[in-house]
Image (tube, helix red, strand yellow):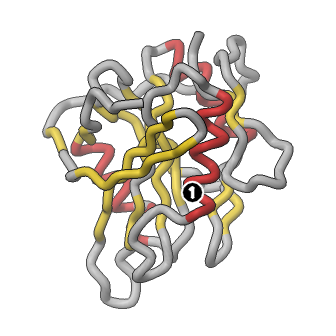
Amino acid sequence: MKRKITPVFSISVFESIRQTVGSLPAESGGMLCGCRKTGVITFFHFDKHATCSSATYVPDTNTLNKLLPQLNAQGLDLMGFVHSHPHQCTSPSTGDEFYCSKIFSANPDLSFFIIPIVDPMVQDRQFCMRVFVATQKGKKIKVERIPLQILEMETPAPELNLSQEPNATPAADIPPVVAESTDEIRTTKE
């Protein structure tokens, strides 16, 4: 499927990624949300309770399942996941591509999924974020690198309540990064 729009990060999202994922050791991450129609990413949720090792990032599905219906109700769609990789691993891994294939299988109307890879500011290295977009044609996943685009704009923070149970559920189930897990992330609005 051909990607029709180019994702653009609000400056607040970019700075939030730099200050969290970009300042921690490899394999931390978070969820990106915004408007699928325009491609503008206006919300980043740092996944502070994710299961992370030196080689894997597994989203905290319980928290995300509480957040996504609230975000969807405020007009924000899941756009992708950003995460960091160990130094010199500058593109999505085979596991990242497998995760994208599971996301597309669960969401046949999804036209793209954003998977930025961060090289964090550790051991005297500079922060670097490379943006990749996954698309699917048939069963084949295509991942391409695109230029990082940042838009200086004011973006109001969505009102979120993580203590309540979601009163609405998004339409599709998306499995987490780890293929063996039975947890699901419910992500897209109806």
In the image, 159 versus 127, the foreground residue is: 127
- The image quadrant of residue 6 is top left
Determine whether 9 is above or below 46 in the image: above
- In the image, what residue type sits under mark 1? Asp
In the image, 129 versus 109, the foreground residue is: 109
Percent coordinates x, y for residue 74 in the rendering: 46, 15
Q: In percent of the image, x 31 and y 84: which residue is there?
A: 125
Q: In percent of the image, x 36 and y 23: which residue is there?
A: 35
Q: Residue furthest left?
A: 152
Left or right side of 13 for 104: right
| Quarter of the figure that contains the N terminus | top left
- The image quadrant of residue 174 is top right
Residue 161 in view, yes or no:
no
Residue that numbered label 1 is attached to? 96
Percent coordinates x, y for residue 81 in the rendering: 50, 47
Percent coordinates x, y for residue 144 in the rendering: 35, 52
Percent coordinates x, y for residue 169 in the rendering: 69, 16
In the image, 160 versus 83, the foreground residue is: 83
| Quarter of the figure that contains the C terminus | top right
- The image quadrant of residue 138 is top right
- Number of marks in picture: 1
Disc 1 residue crowd, few under 14, some 14–19, many 20+, Cα 10 Å: some
Left or right side of 185 for 115: left
Residue 184 in view, yes or no:
yes
